[in-house]
Each structure stands twice: as structure tokens, then as C-alpha cells.
Image (tube, rainbow, N blue to C red):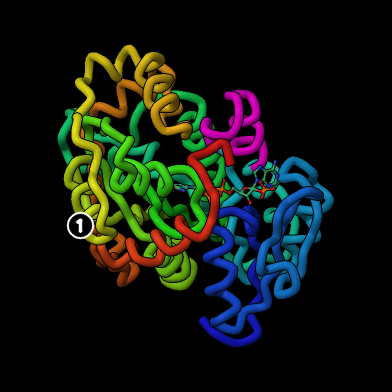
Amino acid sequence: MTGEKIAAVTGATGFLGTHLCSRLLEEGWTVRGLSRAGSDRGDLETDLEWTVGDISDRQPIDSLVDGADVVFHLAGVGLWDAGPETVWDVNFEGTKTVVSACREADIGRLLFTSTSGTLRTPDEGGVATEADRAEPIGAYQASKAAAERVVDRYAEAGGDAVTVHPTSIFGPGDGAFSVQLVTMATDPKMVAHLPGGLSIVGVSDVVEGILAAAEDGTSGEHYILGGENLRYDDALRRIADSAGGTPARVRVPPIAIHAAGPVASVVSTLTGRRLFPFDSDMAQLATQKLFYSSEKAFAELGYTYEPLEAHVEETMAWFESTSVSASPR
Ligand SMILES: NC(=O)c1ccc[n+]([C@@H]2O[C@H](COP(=O)([O-])OP(=O)(O)OC[C@H]3O[C@@H](n4cnc5c(N)ncnc54)[C@H](OP(=O)(O)O)[C@@H]3O)[C@@H](O)[C@H]2O)c1
């Protein structure tokens, strides 16, 4: 996709949005970004056409999306950053605002960024596909699952909309998950790691997957954008090998994770960093292996991902150049 195309991006000031906007600019798109009044626009300050507003404010969303070839709806908030009510308002009500603005405006495609968290196999240890819609655990998953239904209904009614489900995104600029992983892989004070497993995908791979979904995805369809399925200890060892650190040695037993409060506070005291934002629901998830298949995106979008090591150098360079600590951002 090149030329005079117009992208409208919510969440343009966030971790994924910043990478996506930079890539869109490289590809010659005109990029409009939504930012709140106090948002840090970073290096994109002068390169984007900014609309100031909250995701719940209809008027700025109307002017953001009208005339866009693709509306990339990335704005979202997790339980790292906000309480359940705000998570619901931003992720679900905000998506409703975006969809209703799209319905009444002249737009091409809506590309919605949900999460792999809304998908899970019935039996632990399986590899989930787009068909494995799961009962949501916690406000984040519930709000994203409900938002997906809003986007699906828009597509069913004749709108053009595609949903992507990134797994856990790793890369420079992420003060949450990526800092958590890098800290556990390299900080000698960091003794404990989680017992479960997850799919880790580099941010540049997710950006390419989003662009491919915007170009080649089928309206109404969902695509998992995942990476390697790894146990936590394997992921930490591989990051440590690449970065020259010492990975966390002790696997926290599931029973301790299920009593998550004490683990979180001990780890935070040891490192000065908030690493495990658990409530009891999230604690249950953290002990599981949450693995995902990206076969559908491979086949239909030409999606690919690189191994974890390909993303370590850039992420470490960013980590060492900032005084960032794991969320709150
Ligand atoms: N990171 C991951 O591992 C991951 C995995 C799967 C899915 N996702 C999804 O991908 C999307 C981007 O995630 P991310 O990691 O880039 O998150 P992020 O760094 O926290 O960025 C979130 C973005 O949403 C904006 N936002 C939050 N509340 C808003 C509001 N009330 N009105 C307008 N904008 C608001 C933020 O603006 P401010 O700059 O003003 O705060 C920011 O631009 C999210 O929808 C997330 O659920 C992320």
C-alpha cells in the first residue's frame, strides 16, 4: 500500500501505535493521529496530523476518521494502567464510538486491534486459533471481547472491518511487558519467574501483520498475529543469552502465584519495579501455557514473524537508554 492513502490512527501515541505510524509514514501514507491533550507525541509530533480528543468524544473521532482509507483503531487500556471501569469505558465504549463514527463517515476499512486474550483453548496446553473464543477472564478481556462483537456487527451490516489479535508484544518503547521480560532476563536481583508460557511477538512483526490485514484481510474475519510459543524460562534464557544477562532462576510455584499478592509485593520490593499486576483471575492465567497459532494469518495475509532473538538488541538498547521501569507507564 503506497501513495496518497490516508490513515487515521487511534492509540497513535502508544507503544504499538508509535511503531505503526512510523511505518505508515515510511510507506508514504498521510497519517492522522488521535492524541489526548496531555499525550506524549514523542518523535511523531511534527510528522502526523493530530486530532486532540478522548476516545469517548464523538466530535474529534468524526473528524479523525472522515475520509480515511483505513481507520487503525488501537487505542486501548489494560489493567496495568487503569481500573476495570476505565478499561471497559476505553476499550468497549471507545470502540462503539469509533464504529459509529465509521458508520456515518466516508471511510475505507476499519482495522481493529483486539488481543489474543479473547481466545483460549478449552483444555490447557492447547494451541488456540481464531475459532477458540473463550469466556473472558477479567475486565480487559471482557471489554475487548465485547468490542470485537461491535466490530463484527459493523462488518455483518456491510461495513468493511478486520480484527487482529496480537499476542504478547515485545519491543522498544514498551514500559510494561517488554520491561518485565528484560528485567527478569538480565537483572541479577530478579530471582523469580512465572511458571506458564506465552506467545511472544516482536512489535515490527505485529506492525507488518496489521498492514497486511489492512491490505489483504477479509472483512469480518479475525487474524491472530503471534510469535514463538515459549515457556517463560525458555524465553528468559534466550533473552539473557542474547543480551548477556542472568535469567531469573526460580520458577514461582503455581500455588504461590495463585496467592498472588505476596509474590507481587516481594518481587516489587526486591527490584523496585512493579512486575506482576495480579488479581486472582490474572494469577490463574499466569500459571498456564497460553499458546497461539498464526496459521490463518500466514496463509491469508502472508504474515511471518522472526525469532525472539531478532528483537532483543533493539529492545535492550532502548531499555538501557531510558530510566524506564515496568508500568505504571
Ligand atoms: N502491548 C501488547 O502486548 C498488546 C497485545 C495485544 C493487544 N494489544 C492491544 O494493542 C493496542 C495498543 O497497545 P499498546 O501496547 O500500544 O498500549 P499503550 O502503549 O498503552 O497505548 C495505548 C494507547 O491508547 C491511548 N488511549 C488510552 N486511553 C485513551 C482514551 N481514553 N482516549 C484516547 N486514547 C486513549 C493512549 O493514549 P495516551 O498516550 O494519551 O495514554 C495510547 O496512545 C491496545 O488496544 C492493546 O489492547 C497490545
Q: Residue at x 72, y 57 (%)?
A: 34
Say if the magenta span includes residue 92. yes
Q: Is mark 1 within 8 Å of ligand 1?
A: no
Q: Nearer the viewer, residue 291 or 151?
A: 291
Residue 228: % across, % down: 23, 54
Instruction: Give the farthest residue toward the front.
Output: 188
Q: Quadrant of the C terminus?
A: top right
Question: Where 129 falls versus 69 (above or below)?
Answer: above
> What x and y, as percent, mark residue 202?
36, 60
- Give the answer, above or below, for where 239 lies relative to 282: below
Left or right of 7: which side holds 234?
Answer: left
Residue at 39 percent across and 37 percent down: it is 118
Q: Position of residue 138 (x, y in %)?
A: 45, 24
Nearer-the-camera pick, 86 or 72: 86
Quarter of image, res 9: bottom right
* Point 66% across, 41% down: residue: 94
**Residue closer to the observer: 291 or 253:** 253
The residue range painted magenta reads 78-94
For residue 46, say whether it is visible.
Answer: yes
Q: Which residue is disc 1 drawn over?
A: 241
Amino acid type indicated by mark 1: Asp
Nearest to the observer: residue 82 or residue 310 = 310
